[in-house]
């Protein structure tokens, strides 16, 4: 039989035990929540957010489109590229692939790559992407689309953001001044714009043979004997690239795209102290088999 005294002694002990249990449970729940939050935060922390913007205007037929997709996929599967991804401070990058001509199409949404398997899986997806047919080379329009819809709303926390633009001609939708404004607006977000001009005809002057979108409002072409001799690579360097460490590497035709993309990829995701002093043309080039 429990006496009045023992009852008063027992219940305070019970209350103290219950209180300790409640506090311990709350502490565990808080710790679990913190771990989940940290895990989610770490999952969003990446080294590089890389936007691959690929030209699909009228000059890019099905064969040329496939060469571009195979070249990007081959770069992702390259052991040197994978080691560079995994060797970064956070060991992860995110990739988005955009095709552009008259309008932009988001062919591959933001995709996280933080393992060899991720890289190979993403390469497989890129090889299966459908071609989006376009007509004109509207680069300024594409940059404005990226600025308005992608750069401010990326679901990741990157240490750097890179826009990688490839194409075989100049913007034939808008003036160079309009393109410059669009480029500068992207750079103001902190992104770097690199260029991969595809040189189909090395002796052709920039703008020769280019037809323009109706109402583009471009200045008429200067007669050939009065025209500044400028290559597509030089035009990219003048009008396209921008931001800290921006650079251009040219592909000598579409069948050289894989080699140029792999070299460019390594520099864009590299975190070596001397990365910004690397000449992509000096990097060793493996033999890439295209499918």
Image (tube, rainbow, N blue to C red):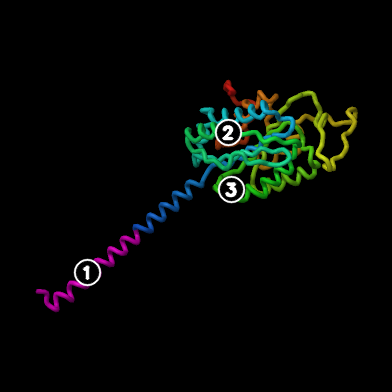
In the rendered image, which residue does mark 1 sit on? 14
Residue 272 appears at what percent x and percent y?
55, 35
Q: Residue at x 62, y 26 (%)?
A: 258
Residue 50, image quadrant: top right
Does the magenta segment cover residue 40? no
The image quadrant where one finds the N terminus is bottom left
Residue 16 visible, this angle:
yes
Q: Is residue 152 above or below residue 30?
A: above
**Lower sequence index among marks 3 and 2:** 2
Foreground label between 3 and 2: 2
Q: CA distance from mark 3 to mark 1?
A: 52 Å
Q: Residue at x 70, y 28 (%)?
A: 61
Mark 1 residue crowding within 10 angstroms, few (<14) / some (14–19) / many (20+): few
Q: Is residue 54 above or below residue 290?
A: below
In the rendered image, which residue does mark 3 sit on? 154
Under tag 1, what secondary structure?
helix
Magenta-highlighted residues: 1-27
Task: Tell me whether the residue at label 2 lies in contact with that at label 1, contact meaning CB atoms closer than 8 angstroms.
Answer: no
In the rendered image, which residue does mark 2 sit on? 126
Under tag 3, what secondary structure?
loop
Q: CA distance from mark 2 to mark 1?
A: 63 Å
């Amino acid at each position: 039989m429990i006496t009045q005294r023992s009852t008063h002694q027992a219940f305070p002990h019970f209350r103290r035990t219950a209180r300790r249990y409640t506090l311990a449970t709350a502490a565990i729940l808080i710790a679990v929540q913190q771990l989940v939050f940290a895990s989610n935060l770490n999952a969003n922390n990446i080294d590089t957010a890389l936007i691959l913007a690929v030209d699909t205007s009228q000059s890019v037929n099905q064969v040329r489109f496939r060469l571009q997709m195979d070249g990007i996929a081959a770069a992702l599967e390259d052991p040197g590229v994978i080691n560079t991804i995994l060797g970064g401070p956070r060991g992860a990058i995110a990739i988005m692939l955009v095709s552009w001509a008259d309008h932009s199409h988001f062919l591959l949404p933001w995709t996280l790559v933080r393992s060899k398997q991720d890289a190979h899986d993403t390469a497989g997806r890129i090889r299966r992407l459908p071609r989006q047919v376009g007509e004109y080379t509207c680069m300024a329009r594409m940059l404005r689309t990226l600025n308005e819809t992608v750069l401010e709303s990326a679901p990741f926390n990157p240490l750097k953001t890179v826009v990688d633009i490839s194409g075989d001609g100049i913007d034939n939708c808008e003036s160079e001044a309009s393109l410059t404004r669009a480029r500068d607006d992207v750079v103001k977000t902190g992104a770097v714009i690199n260029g991969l001009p595809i040189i189909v005809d090395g002796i052709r002057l920039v703008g020769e043979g280019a037809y323009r979108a109706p109402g583009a409002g471009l200045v008429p072409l200067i007669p050939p004997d009065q025209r500044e001799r400028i290559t597509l690579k030089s035009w990219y360097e003048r009008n396209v690239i921008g931001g800290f460490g921006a650079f251009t590497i040219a592909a000598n035709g579409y069948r050289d795209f894989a080699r140029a993309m792999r070299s460019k990829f390594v520099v864009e995701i590299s975190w070596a102290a001397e990365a910004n002093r690397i000449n992509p043309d000096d990097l060793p080039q493996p033999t890439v088999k295209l499918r």
